[in-house]
């Protein structure tokens, strides 16, 4: 019946007969001769000699933050298994474990202390190990991997978990931090700059509007700016070290990679390097390092509408930010999909805001302001105007109007290094809601 001889094997306490060379459970069973004691030769010896190619001990409190950062990079819905993999690389010489992930563009490497018995490299599903480590109590855990079973075994006390492992043959080397002197900067300051510009960057990845531009401004400073076709934000900075590292045409980073930087950026001191094709950031103790690609898209010449918005004869409005934002929020209640604007009527000592639609009614509200203007009226998308004002620091704002339909500049009264430029809506006709006579 069988092309190969049958043997008796002990499997889970039962004696079974089967084809010893082809049965799928063969590797997990010990060969037993009916007339001899179990032998350590053959398969048994083979199983005992399985190479444990990584074995480490580490503290969850030390690594949970790094594992979470690594998991933040992996795409949650990608169909590519490699991009959902977190790579663990143990170094005995350095006494460290590195957690590495990529989404195909952004790369993250978090290096944390560990007691390394055997060094090695293995991949596991990022979401699984991240959620597991995060849910474990604080304390030591042991991670051990073998190529025989194809699993990563994580133990803590009487808890044992096994995760499917990805072979190191699938691993692709990550970009290395460039050699040379890094720029040391405060991560929180860099994060504040990103926050000021990010909301003005377009979501269009194929457009020059969809990136953050960092460029020398020709006056010894650096411009950080972004635009989406309707509004433009710029903040200017003096930093001689960064200026020396920037190419004359500046660098551009696409919005989706700026979003990754926001997720990974530390509030402590960081080191920055600009490579030929990538932008690198790491913390000062080399614990976390990540890099994003630079784009070669050409950014527009924004000097034209900056000079237009800040021309000498521009109309100037000074008002309290809270007064204007609160009035706009109430006016937005009366906006609809068809009527998304608020109309600002400007007098010498006040601004009157009006929004109306036949389905919602109308709102009219006047707030105090100091106005030196020849522009009697201007209209903006209400939500956009609120968003711009909320990003300005301080209590007082200054608005410069070049014309009723030209670029308008919004800035904080005490911060002239950061401002937002927006185009007003063209007023074709305006109809206020009125109740019909009975």
Image (tube, rainbow, N blue to C red):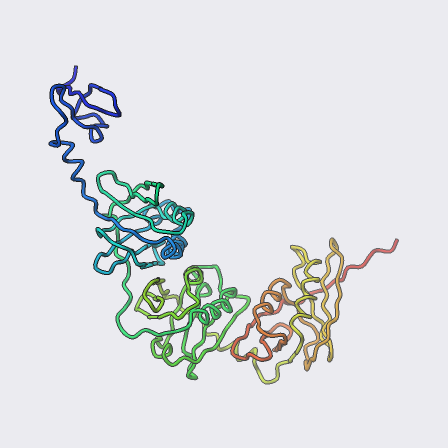
> Looking at the image, which is closer to me, 237 or 277?
237
* In the image: residue 339, left or right of residue 281: right
Q: Residue at x 14, y 35 (%)?
A: 45
**Up-down relation of residue 146 to residue 196 (above or below):** above
- Relative to 320, is 193 on the left or the right? left
Residue displayed at 41% across by 78% down: 216
Looking at this view, name the residue that lies furthest to the top. Answer: 1
Residue most extreme to the right = 438
Q: Is residue 70 above or below residue 286?
A: above
Q: Nearer the viewer, residue 234 or 63?
A: 63
Q: Which image quadrant is residue 420 in?
A: bottom right
* Residue 246 left/right relative to 17: right
Where is residue 231 drawn, in percent x and y? 54, 68
Quadrant where the N terminus sits is: top left
The mark tally for this picture is: 0
- Horizontal side of 362 relative to 285 (left or right) equals right
In the displayed structure, 438 sits above or below 400; it is above
> Residue 84's x, y, as percent?
36, 48
| Residue at image coords 69%, 80% | 371
Tell which of 238 and 249 is nearer to you.
238
Judge by depth and name the residue closer to the eye, 33 or 371: 33
Q: Position of residue 365 (x, y in %)?
A: 75, 67
**Hey, which quadrant is residue 20 in on the image?**
top left
**Which residue: 57% across, 72% down?**
392
Q: Position of residue 36 (x, y in %)?
A: 11, 22
- Corner quadrant of residue 312: bottom right
């Amino acid at each position: 019946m069988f092309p190969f001889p049958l043997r008796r094997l002990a499997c889970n306490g039962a004696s079974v007969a089967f084809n010893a060379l082809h049965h799928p459970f063969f590797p997990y069973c010990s060969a037993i001769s009916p007339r001899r004691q179990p032998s350590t030769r053959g398969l048994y010896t083979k199983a005992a000699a399985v190479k444990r190619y990584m074995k480490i001990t580490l503290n969850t409190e030390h690594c949970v933050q790094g594992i979470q950062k690594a998991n933040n990079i992996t795409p949650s819905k990608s169909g590519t298994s490699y991009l959902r993999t977190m790579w663990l690389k143990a170094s005995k010489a350095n006494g460290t474990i590195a957690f590495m992930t990529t989404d195909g563009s952004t790369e993250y490497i978090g290096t944390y202390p560990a007691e390394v018995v055997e060094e090695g490299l293995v991949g596991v599903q990022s979401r699984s190990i991240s959620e597991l480590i995060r849910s474990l109590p604080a304390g030591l855990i042991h991670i051990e991997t073998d190529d025989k079973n194809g699993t990563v075994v994580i133990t803590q006390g009487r808890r044992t978990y096994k995760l499917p492992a990805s072979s190191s043959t699938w691993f692709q080397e990550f970009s290395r931090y460039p050699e040379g002197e890094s720029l040391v900067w405060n991560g929180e300051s860099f994060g504040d700059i990103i926050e000021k510009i990010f909301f003005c960057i377009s979501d269009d990845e194929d457009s020059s509007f969809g990136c953050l531009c960092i460029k020398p401004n020709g006056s010894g400073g650096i411009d950080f700016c972004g635009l989406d076709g309707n509004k433009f934000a710029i903040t200017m900075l003096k930093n001689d070290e960064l200026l020396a590292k920037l190419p004359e045409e500046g660098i551009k980073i696409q919005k989706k990679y700026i979003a990754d930087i926001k997720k990974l950026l530390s509030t402590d001191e960081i080191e920055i390097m600009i490579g030929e094709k990538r932008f690198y950031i790491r913390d000062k103790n080399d614990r976390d390092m990540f890099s994003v690609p630079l784009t070669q898209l050409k950014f527009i010449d924004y000097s034209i509408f900056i000079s237009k918005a800040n021309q000498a004869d521009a109309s100037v409005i000074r008002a309290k930010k809270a007064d204007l934002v609160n009035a706009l929020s109430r006016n937005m209640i009366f906006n609809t999909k068809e009527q998304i604007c608020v109309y600002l009527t400007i007098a010498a000592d006040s601004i009157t805001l009006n929004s109306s639609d036949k389905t919602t009614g109308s709102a009219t509200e006047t707030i105090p302001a100091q106005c030196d203007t020849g522009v009697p009226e201007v209209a903006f998308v209400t939500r956009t105007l609120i968003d711009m004002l909320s990003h300005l620091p301080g209590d007082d704002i200054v608005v410069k109007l070049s014309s009723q339909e030209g670029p308008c500049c919004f800035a904080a009264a005490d911060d002239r290094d950061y401002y937002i430029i927006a185009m007003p809506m063209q007023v074709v006709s305006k109809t206020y809601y009125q109740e019909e006579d009975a």
